[in-house]
Image (tube, helix red, strand yellow):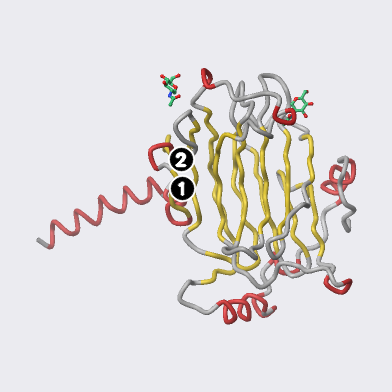
Amino acid sequence: MAKMSVLLGFFLGIVMMGLARSAKFDDLYQASWALDHLAYEGETLKLKLDNYSGAGFASRNKYLFGKVSMQIKLVEGDSAGTVTAFYMSSDGPDHDEFDFEFLGNTTGEPYLIQTNVYVNGVGNREQRLDLWFDPTKDFHTYSLLWNQRQVVFLVDETPIRVHTNLEHKGIPFPKDQAMGVYSSIWNADDWATQGGRVKTDWSHAPFVASYKGFEIDACECPVSVADADSAKKCSSSSEKRFWWTSQHWPSSTCTRATSLSGFEPITCL
Ligand SMILES: *[C@@H]1O[C@H](CO)[C@@H](O)[C@H](O)[C@H]1NC(C)=O
Ligand SMILES: *[C@@H]1O[C@H](CO)[C@@H](O)[C@H](O)[C@H]1NC(C)=O
């Protein structure tokens, strides 16, 4: 018996070491929509959209402030009509939300990134941006950095949008509601591509978005703890985590960021 459990422990150890990286998805996330449209290939997770369903996943926990990243390789070839999203959101009608939406296109035409920020249930802050690379050829890292001063959208560590806390001017800022982290792929051919003129061509299905490199460095808010207590803990500067004070950017990043059209000014070192 003892021998067997030692042996079992040994094999479990090997299995866990072998899966260390891909197991991370399961540590942080779970499927939230159409289990059969999610698939693992080695350390890569794939979300599939076909004429039956899209797919999605959600974080197991909620967070208040922090940095959340994932590497995504968007749908190759004809992705017209499809939207892949990576976002953080709280629950309820007065929710806060930070969105990356990747709007597909016909073969050879560029993807667009649309970002949005909802505060207390109010959005209408869309911005659209062309990328400086083809996001379907390789994995790139997309991140959301959130602290009490700002919400920053980053692509390969380059800030592409900064939503600054302007509460001193009476503008509400998201800082009280814990958020989950989500991603999904779905059909949005009524608006996504070239204003909705180009429809999804289902003969090219399944449309596949691939993911890896899941990272969450954030203040966790267990469901068992009251929101107000979580807010107090996560707002305390005693933790002094990097994302707490992060507000300046190295000059290399700044050069690219400030050259992007539609970009709001950021403070450069
Ligand atoms: C979905 O697409 C498949 C393959 O193109 C086709 O056989 C099937 O009839 C379609 N189903 C629906 C509900 O449109
Ligand atoms: C798709 O390509 C067209 C033509 O290049 C471009 O105008 C459009 O902004 C691109 N993106 C989307 C999402 O429509």
Q: Quadrant of residue 39?
A: top left
- Which residue ends up furthest to the left in the rendered image? 1
Q: Position of residue 154 (x, y in %)?
A: 73, 49
Q: Is residue 204 left or right of residue 244?
A: left
Residue at the image position 87 percent from the left and 44 percent from the top: 262
- Split into quadrants, the picture shows ligand 2 in the one at top right
Q: Quadrant of residue 232?
A: bottom right
Q: Does 234 appear above or below 184?
A: below
Query: Is 258 in front, or is 127?
Result: 127
Q: The residue under label 2 is which amino acid type?
A: Glu
Secondary structure of residue under mark 2 = loop
Secondary structure of residue under mark 1 = loop
Query: Is 181 in front, or is 126?
Result: 126
Give yes or no for contact between labels 1 and 2 (Cβ–Cβ under 8 Å): yes
Q: Position of residue 20 (x, y in %)?
A: 42, 50
Q: Position of residue 110 (x, y in %)?
A: 73, 27
Residue at the image position 55 percent from the left and 39 percent from the top: 185
Q: Is residue 192 left or right of residue 210?
A: right
Residue 21's disc number = 1
Crowd rating for badge 1 (residues with CA inside 10 Å; few <14, some 14–19, many 20+): some
| Quadrant containing the C terminus in the rendered view | bottom right
Q: Does 95 appear above or below 133?
A: below
Q: The residue under label 1 is which amino acid type?
A: Arg
C-alpha distance separating marks 1 and 2: 7 Å
Q: Does 153 appear above or below 146?
A: above
Residue 62's disc number = none
Is the CB–ligand 2 distance for label 2 below 8 Å? no
Check disc 2 and report the residue beneath it: 43
